[in-house]
Image: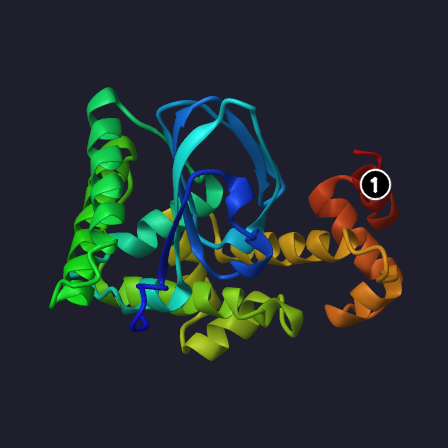
Amino acid sequence: MDKNGYTDIRFFDTLGDCDLSLMAGNVLHVLCIGGSMGFVFQEVRFNVAPGDYVILPNASLASCFAESADFTAVIMSLSESLVASMALRSDYGVIGHLSLLQNPVMKLSEHDFEVCLEGMKYLRCRMADENHLFRGEMIEHLLMAHVLDLYDIHARGNALPSVSKRTADLLLRFVGMLYDGEYLTGRDLNHYASRLCVTPHYLSEVCRKVSGRPATYWIDRFTVSAIVRMLWRRELSLTDISERFGFSSLSYFSRYVQKHTGLSPSQYRNNVAAR
């Protein structure tokens, strides 16, 4: 936060208003009011309709945004540092986070839509009150209330398990390593387990219990997403990309991409160019 405004929270009316290239690491919230939009997230295409609430845990993992001419929404961007500082007394955050990495779109009931719309509009309105003597604290508490409403909505709509604080801390560190690009130097389960001081079996089972997926799924998912983003950059050769990810050979790199996308790197790149 600076003296002129609360820069960790930004609101927009359309996707065209925000420069997504500058929001890497930010959490992006989109409440669709009218019209429609679509985007690709972790290589899956999602379509958004009125009443849908989108939470992108990291805006850089999404691409190919498109919105209809009549699309209207409340869009909120939260900085990575702000989200990290929100010490909510709930371990649901990491559970919801892993769930949102698989499906970032929540279908809201009419009541939940009104709750979210009212909460976001009120937060946006109060941010304009720069003369409030406790403005920073007020905004943070309003945001926390909104996030807790989202926890409630998501938890009611998903049969997700409760976890201990130890498990939540372990998963936060594991996911944090992936966000930090650890897959550039290691994609082997043993590498992560060793760094986290647990056995590979324990790490995998904890991930499976919370997300329904083993740890290797998340390692590969982050890796493939990053590779695909590099394949979009045609100035990078396939050899350049392979070397950046530490593959022992171009053929091994090609087999890895083929296995996880169904296409060779060159086929994937050509498909992107043809869109």
Task: Tell me the colour scheme of the image.
Answer: rainbow
Q: Amino acid at mark 1?
A: Ala
Q: Decide if residue 170 is in sight here.
A: no
Q: Nearest the camera: 211 or 136?
A: 136
Q: Position of residue 65 (x, y in %)?
A: 59, 38
Q: Residue at x 52, y 41 (%)?
A: 15
* Vertical placement of residue 10 versus 193, above or below: above
Q: Nearest the camera: 111 or 8?
A: 8
* Vertical placement of residue 224 versus 109, above or below: below
Q: Quadrant location of residue 41?
A: top right
| Residue 65 shown left or right of residue 34 in the figure | right
Q: Residue furthest left?
A: 133
| Residue 217 shown left or right of residue 27 in the figure | right
Q: Position of residue 108 (x, y in %)?
A: 30, 27
Look at the image and tell me in which quarter the C terminus lies.
top right
Q: Residue furthest front?
A: 131
Label 1: few (<14), some (14–19) or many (≥20) C-alpha neighbours in 10 Å: few
Q: Which residue has dot 1 on it? A: 273
Q: Residue at x 51, y 71 (%)?
A: 192
| Residue 76 shown left or right of residue 215 in the figure | left
Q: Nearest the camera: 192 or 153?
A: 153
